Amino acid sequence: MGIAATIRALQSALQSAEGQGFERRSVEPILKTENLWKLYHAGKVEVPALRGVNFEVQAGESVAVMGPSGCGKSSLLYVIGGLAQASRGRVLVDGNDLTEMRDSERTKLRRSKIGFVFQRFNLLPTLTAKGNIAIAQYIHGDGFDPHRFDVVTKMLGLDGRLAHKPSEMSGGEQQRVAIARAIINEPKILLADEPTGNLDTKNSEIVLEMLRRLNKDLGQTIVMITHNPEATTYFDRVVHMRDGVIVDGIPAD
Amino acid sequence: MMGEFIVRNLFHRPMRTLIGILAIAVEVALVVLVVGLVSGLLAETAKRIEGVGADIVLQPPAASVLLGFGGAPMPIKIGDKLKELKYVQYVAPTLLQSNSAESVEVIYGIDPESFRAVSGGFVFLAGHDIAGPNDILIDDWAAKAKHLKIGDTYALFNNDWHVVGIVEHGKGARVFVPITTLQDLVGAHDKASIFWIKCTRPEHTQDLMEGIRHILPGYTVRPIKDMLSIYTSTNIPGLKIFIDAMIALAVSIGLLVIFLTMYTTVIERTRDIGVLKSLGASSPFIVRTLLMESGLLCLGGIAMGVGLSYLLRGVSLKVFPTLSILITLAWILRSGIIALLGTIAGASYPAWVASRKDAVEALTFD
């Protein structure tokens, strides 16, 4: 399927999705970090990955985080996604302070409010595309919801590939499955860690367009890490990081 | 959904899964066969002793329940004293001698006339009764196992015996020789190991036992009808320990293989565990998933183990016709539970390791 055709299909599916229970969200603050530090230990040496990050994302906003390798982008993503514990400072997700939560509480919050998309897709290799998406629903606790499943898979143009395993799909298809898995439970925030890093230009554009549509048409809050300056054009705002701190925040246009 | 996930995980590495299943199968088969062999041999021996047809067996003081391991310390003249007792119909002295040349077996040295009187006589499938000093009777199972037929010579206790009769199994031993010849060969002149006693009526058994205890205090007097209940692993010295040791060995095999299988599974699936954590899977969810996977693997192993047990029993009985392996539903269930508990124990640590993995490290694992 060509890019234009894919986008047309996506637009059509999105319109359908809006009419089937996916609501547009109002713009309101949903993610905030205050003086956020993350220290790693290499033997007896403390290595700071984040050095007092102050960062804010409004509900319904799409933000691209750019910066050189090792500047702390991924650490920021993992901490605001509750996968890693902050060393100092605060992380507020939809009003919940992650830094005061135990691991099990962060897991619960992640299950209901966060969706992840990774550079290497990270699909479960033993499951089909359908299984990879359905397991997220299962873990979420609501069981398999065929209606929502159909809406999301049609939206991402996956309905013909659901019986295939990751090893039988292209990179672009795998990433679309990963996006479907991330949004199937309607998370408050979608965190994407270089989602086009392993894709060719054509598939990168498809994935970026899908992310943009998710944001514009469904109001999905998205924070994406990227090395690719062209990818930032699909987002409302670009944040630059260097040496563990955010150095600016400028409108993409 | 979880069922599909677990089954697909098992099929993802078929060789590893097969090895795990085989380990459990060996564990189950080992338990079932060891217990079955012990129970089978004991039950079959007890049944053969019952089959002699006596009501009471007299043994020397502090004698083992294993009839063939007591030597020959009783004067054969005791038989005359026993015959004088009320309610005694027949008395048959028997000299028992163990033979371990081919397999462990007990040879009965009998007085053909008195033994016939107590037992009601052999059922001859071929040949005739003992007539000469070097005549030997073999039961049908032993004849098959030893490939003996009428007219063959059989070397035993440095003596060449003439096979004169093939008898139906079930009369105490599998091999019978004249008591006097056996006494000479083993240097136990006028001695017997046991006396079989037939009461005038079965209901006189208790009274007769009291009478025997009165004239032969300290001697071991057992009613034959209790032999089946006496011949259990708990009554045979060391047998219970042997069975327990074999079960422990079997469990160790299963536990270690499952441990290794699940540990390598967890290492291989480190990234997948990170993915599950990123989706919000809790530690109990991850532990449960791995334990269910191990459990399913174990169920496959139990099924294969039961099949393997029956297969090995069939092969064993073909090769060793005198063996008796008793496979019971109770021990199949027990071995299954033992295997399941061993599996849970073996998979617990890898499952715990998986649940404790750092999500970020897991996601970046190569």
Image (spheres, grey):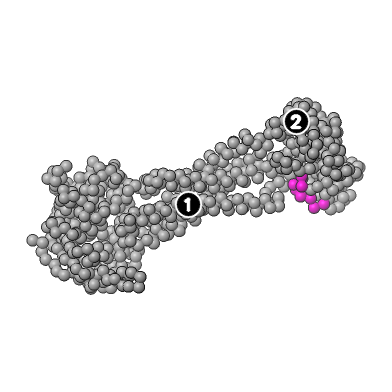
**Is residue A208 rendered magenta in the image?**
no
Q: What's the amino acid at mark 1?
A: Ile
Q: Position of residue B235 (x, y in %)?
A: 70, 50
Q: Is residue A59 visible?
A: no
Residue at mark 2 to residue at mark 1: CA–CA distance: 50 Å
Question: SS at mark 2?
Answer: strand
Question: B127 above or below A18?
Answer: above
Say which quarter of the image contains residue A115.
bottom left
Does residue B344 appear left or right of residue B6 in this picture?
right
Give the main secondary structure of the magenta stretch: loop
Residue nearest the observer in this picture, B360 or A35 = B360
At x 81%, y 29%, the residue is B129
Q: Circle 2 sits on which residue?
A: B167
Q: Position of residue A126 (x, y in %)?
A: 34, 47
Q: Tell me the crowding category of disc 2: few under 14, some 14 to 19, or many 20 or more residues within 10 angstroms, Cα based.
A: many
Does residue B73 appear left or right of residue A6 in this picture?
right
Q: Position of residue A217 (x, y in %)?
A: 14, 53
Q: Tell me the crowding category of disc 1: few under 14, some 14 to 19, or many 20 or more residues within 10 angstroms, Cα based.
A: many
Residue positioned most to the left: A253
Image quadrant occupied by the N terminus of chain A: top left
Question: SS at mark 1?
Answer: helix
At x 17%, y 63%, the residue is A66
Q: Circle 1 sits on which residue?
A: B258
Tell whether label 1 touches label 2 (CB within 8 Å). Answer: no
In magenta, the rendered stretch is B61-69
At x 14%, y 43%, the residue is A2
Q: What's the amino acid at mark 2?
A: Val
Sequence-first disc among 2 and 1? 2
Residue nearest the observer in this picture, B273 or B208 = B273
